[in-house]
Amino acid sequence: MNPVPLYVAIPLGAAFLIPLLGMWWKKSGETLAVLSTLVLAVMAILAIGTPAMVHHMGGWTAPLGIALVSDGLTVLLLIAVNVIAFLCIIFSLKYMKVYTGLTKYYSLFMLMVAGMNGVVVSGDLFNLFVFLEVASIASYALVAFGVEADELEAGFKYMILGSVASVMILFAVGTVYAVTGTLNMADASREIATRFGGAEMNPALLLAAAFFLMGFGLKAALVPFHAWLPDAHPSAPAPISAMLSGVVIKSLGVYAMCRVMFHVFGFGTASPSSAIIANAMIGFSVLSIVVGGLLAIGQWDFKRLLAYSSIGQIGYVTLGIGVGARVLATGGTRSLAALAILGGLFHLINHAAFKSLLFLSSGAIQQATGTRDMKMLSGLRKRMPITAATTNLAALSISGVPPFSGFWSKLIIIVATIRAGLMGVAVVAIAMAFVTLAYYVKVQREILFGPVRGPAESAKEVSPLMYVPMIILAIVCVGFGLLYPVLGSRILEPARDALLNGAEYVKLVLG
Amino acid sequence: MRATVGLILLAVIGVGVGISLLAIPFGAPKTEIGDYYIENAREDTGATNVVTSVVVGYRAFDTLGEVTVLFVAALGLGAVLATAGGKRGRSGVEPASLILSAGNIFLFPLILLFGAYIFTHGHLTPGGGFQGGAVIASAFLLVYLSSPGKRINESGATLTESVSGLVFVAIGLLGLTYGTHYFLANFLPKGTLNTLFSAGIIPVIYCAIGLKVGSELAGVVDNLMEETE
Amino acid sequence: MTVYFMCAVLLMMGLYCLVAKKNIVKKIIGIVIMDYAVNLYLITIGYKNNGVAPIIEKTTSPELLERFVDPLPQALVLTSIVIGLGTLSLMVSMVIRLYEKHGTFDMSQISKLRG
């Protein structure tokens, strides 16, 4: 029996049960959430190395029904989403005690996980849109969960921009259906390849690609569609910020963009239209890297700095993938494209690990000292040793200091960019890597080192329920750097091959 | 100033979008899949309303996602509008006129009946779970407008909503273990065409959806009405 | 052909309303107009010339079956309308709360987060 639909059915069932049982059993939310995310995380880790599978919903074969596909790229994202969801739930058990209405919080969290899992396993364009909406609406409600003035304004702005993105994505899905006559991604890619392979694409299809890029780019917070992120991520409660920056923008934005662009539109045909799409991706990535880095330097609010840093790092991820796309579209060597995409995907999973760790530690600091203003914090290393050590590790990783994981992924992306001939872009990427190092050194200097004064005087180390997930994530950061040869071949290379081999995807789904 | 610049920019973009869309044929769509649905829906699912067989038969997973979206929105609305110390009253609403309060007593059960008719016959006539649920919720809205002091039984609404949602997921999981081993497979007998008890799991799912949507939207209206004071 | 053009015009009108108006309720109306534009676009994709609704009755002949419009976009629009309703209800709840906190519907008064 195929376990693929269980990734969606388990969190959905948990989310429907939590309000029902919450009428009589107060602890239902926490117990069910911990249990279901644990089961999902174990299932995702056990799925490493399994061959690609397809599940046809209801028994209707594709393209008549909806197909759920689990290939290498899906497994990579499933691991990231479910493991980080489990760790954030453990963190929330203690952190969210100050909020009321916790039954709704856990139910909304499980629905967000269900939506992200649904996006990642979906093999059908409209199904991807529906689950993207499930995850997005759950995240809008969770950002505004504390109903203070700041959080409401951030949630409202996020909601408005997110709805515009969803409308654009739906418009593009409709256009793809009108031109190709099918909604299944494999079938649409086969149609587009046979009708337009090597020649100019239908202008309506190019419009659909542009709308997809804009819609998914807004979900991924690429510049110039990033305006919601610096307000939304700091205002959310810390475990939700960790989920948002760590996995939501990646599964709803970057993954969906990769899946649609590589598999439905396809880059392997060396046509001028695919080169336009690839160059647009690279352009947005460079803008994100520059804007994210420059605006992060001047921040004194810890979470806002982390939010701008997210924008910059997602720029690196899409740069790697965009360079790979461009190499494929202009007829370059496959091995170079494979290197660039590998770098992008490696940075994706690295950033999921260290950004969620950084946001969780900002939550721990906020709970212990009551503030996140970096001017007032100082010397936390002495009062909160575990939190400080994990924050230190994460900051070193994200700045690209060897031998941590961030160094390797950035190195691969920059080497691939240079070998693809984009010298200017590579110079910008290297310069911004130094800027990233600069502002994380600022974070360490202001918050961790120095004499203990101000709110840090009364700070104590947080409870084990909060620091154990942080320790686990720190081990992951170090582990991905040291154990790359083992982990890379089992997790990353199948993902990279899944993106490069469009023909195999079509054969898998349509038989 | 900023408004006129925005207007011109959007007009240019709109013309560009419109001209790109001229490449799509109108009135003669490319419908291999649509033709298959029209010809085979009767044998495959047993429903005579082809749109229903698409919504609950071939693409039932999308309907599960749609039900989930409504659930998330209702839950989020409850979370945002929740007040810390119990509920506030609705003292600011004007008392209803005689026509409204008298007509409500007569119309409320009829509207409920009509909504139930729509969702139970979703596989035979136009309509279905969502439409029937919306009609049921409008019956409750009529009650709120005509008798401002009344409130629905909140725990009853939550109970109906959660149980119906779980019924939908359970039917899906039953299809996984029973029948043809696929999630949401049609494992009940298809019966004869054009009768009420035909089309396998479709009327069951539509009843669950109709009750869920009705209680959910009634809960949403209840939450929103509490705020007016 | 002109139908698609009008859908694009409606989409841009909704986008203009969202961008240019300061009142947050009017911004929400802009998003609702955009939703309607996309739903209209999806429905008109499935139209066949001289089409009829795809409901099979006892008196349906095979020639009538040829004239049925495409049922798939109708299923998509059903889902899309419900999703639009969900989004609208959540936005309205946030507007209600914002009005309670700030006392105004004007976006420029409400935007305090800067930097």
Image (cartoon, rainbow, N blue to C red):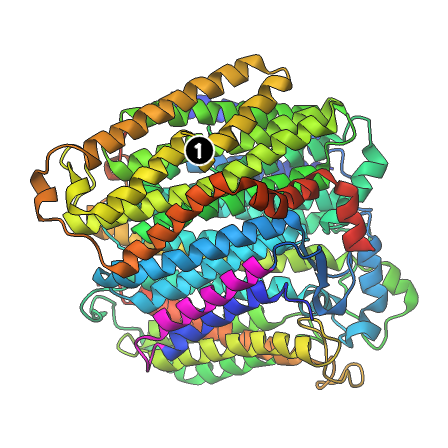
Tell whether C36 sits left or right of A176: left
Q: Which residue is mark 1?
A: A403
Circle 1 crowding by C-alpha within 10 Å: few under 14, some 14–19, many from 20: some
Quarter-of-image position of residue C59: bottom right
Q: Position of residue A437 (x, y in %)?
A: 35, 26
Image quadrant for the N terminus of chain A? Answer: bottom right
Residue at 13% from the left image edge and 49% from the top image edge: A459
One can see residue A255 in this view: yes
Letter of the chain that mark 1 sits on in the rendering: A
Residue at 91% from the left image edge and 63% from the top image edge: C63
Magenta part, dominant SS: helix
Tell whether C13 sits left or right of B18: left
Q: Which residues are magenta?
A: A22-46
Q: Position of residue A343 (x, y in %)?
A: 57, 33
Three-letter amino acid code of the residue under disc 1:
Pro
Which residue is at the far top? A424
Does dot 1 land on a helix, a strand or a loop?
Answer: loop
Task: Tell me, yes or no, whether the highlighted magenta stretch contains residue B204.
Answer: no
Tell whether A98 sits left or right of A112: left
Residue at 58% from the left image edge and 28% from the top image edge: A281
In the foreground, A367 or A108: A367
Eyeballing the image, is A26 above or below A215? Answer: below
Quarter-of-image position of residue A311: top left
